[in-house]
Amino acid sequence: MAKLDQLIKELCPDGVEYRTIGEIAVDIYRGSGITRDQVTPEGIPCVRYGEIYTTYGIWFDKCVSHTSEEAITNKKYFEFGDILFAITGESVEEIAKSCAYVGEEKCLAGGDIVVLKHNQNPQYISYALSTTTAQQQKSKGKVKSKVVHSSVPAIKEIRIPLPPLPVQNEIVRILDNFMDITAELIAELTAELTARKKQYEYYRELLLMFDSSIQWDELGNIIDFRNGKGHEQAIVSKGKYIVVNSKFISTNGIVKKYSDYQISPLFADDILMVMSDLPNGKALAKCYLVDSNDTYTLNQRIGALKVKDNKLVSTRFLYYILNRNKQLLKYDNGLDQTNLKKNDILSILIPLPTLSEQERIVAILDRFDAICNDLISGLPVEIEARRKQYEYYRDKLLSFKEVGA
């Protein structure tokens, strides 16, 4: 930081100029469509817009996709130093995510990508475009819908600080180092979280293993079932009701959306189950037990199950039996999205040991669950804290007094 402070003192003591992307651009243009069928194992490297959201960070030097150059009619290339923007996405908050290409090969840009050519440090431009302030500019005026769009004119209007190149270079060095350290810490925490989850799942499976010597019955004879309804048009930033969707259940209630409309109310001791997930997903048949004073509303593709007779089966025992139940996971073929049907769920067999035995098992699992969840809930919080710490220092480093302000 001392070196950066000295460079700023020497090269821009009175502040930094702010420039729009349009002013920075040597050239700026849209890519040309590359379909999924045109992606090949070998050929010219290429980037499709979705990969900017899912695969690439601040910068990258190798493309994960290739295509046949001859198959693309209207070729749009990018090279070392160019910035790529994804101008179509699913989220207003992430629209126009960008990254810098610092590889040596000449590559093709797919459709819904904007390519920026410039004469600045590419990694600096990419860092500056990732800040909270830049993202607010990218999101401004965008309409929340299933698909969100930006454009070349909108990209050109984004305004970022543009210090002299030596200052840019030093900021990149600092942020690259900080990002490496953050990534290493997150990897360690993620590995610890995975190990804890496996440990918990092992002991849960051991305690919930039963043979034919006890009574079994179909779930449909034990519970009442109801489906949720769609809330996508009713989501608000802060509403009266927490919308229970698959993300809410898979994160044990950490990730929340809200609605002012209670389309399908929930009640204490409802067992909620995710009925739809991507191939090999971690949310399918994941359950959540309603046991708090929060007021919920049930989203589509989430099932709510209520025990009919608490003298026959304990709700918490059934919750443990149902959570990621193997009889339901068999419907995931690993190729297509799995959509559990009501009859799939109601036809699974449930072991029914005596109520006292159920309560004994629940007591053990509750204690084990509490110990593990302290760690499991704590680690994601720590991971998120590391990310926020990085974002804080990134935004701080890229905030300058503007010349003449």
Image (cartoon, rainbow, N blue to C red):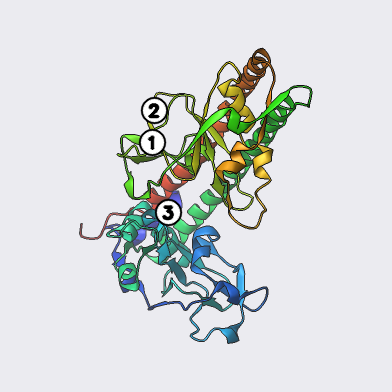
Q: Which mark is residue 294?
A: 2
Q: Amino acid at mark 2?
A: Asp
Circle 2 SS class: loop
Q: In 3D space, how far apart are the residues under numbered discs 2 and 3 (Cα atoms)?
A: 49 Å
Q: Which mark is residue 242?
A: 1
Q: Which mark is residue 4?
A: 3
Quarter residue 128 falls in: bottom left
Mark positioned earlier in the residue sequence (2 or 1): 1
Label 3 CA crowd tier, 10 Å (few <14, some 14–19, many 20+): some
Quarter residue 344 falls in: top right
Mark positioned earlier in the residue sequence (2 or 3): 3
Is the Cβ of the residue at disc 1 closer than 8 Å to that at disc 3? no
Q: Amino acid at mark 1?
A: Ile
Label 2 CA crowd tier, 10 Å (few <14, some 14–19, many 20+): few
Q: In 3D space, how far apart are the residues under numbered discs 2 and 1 (Cα atoms)?
A: 8 Å
Q: Nearer the viewer, mark 1 or mark 3?
A: 1
Residue 297 in the image, given as x and y percentages of width and height:
39, 36
**Residue closest to the far top:** 356
Circle 1 SS class: strand
As displayed, is residue 181 above or below residue 354? below
Observer able to see residue 285? no
Is the Cβ of the residue at disc 2 closer than 8 Å to that at disc 1? yes
Observer able to see residue 324? yes
Residue 269 in the image, given as x and y percentages of width and height:
49, 24
Mark positioned earlier in the residue sequence (1 or 3): 3
Q: Residue at x 42, y 31 (%)?
A: 266
Which quarter of the rendered picture does the C terminus lie within? Answer: bottom left
Q: Residue at x 47, y 36 (%)?
A: 254
Label 1 CA crowd tier, 10 Å (few <14, some 14–19, many 20+): many
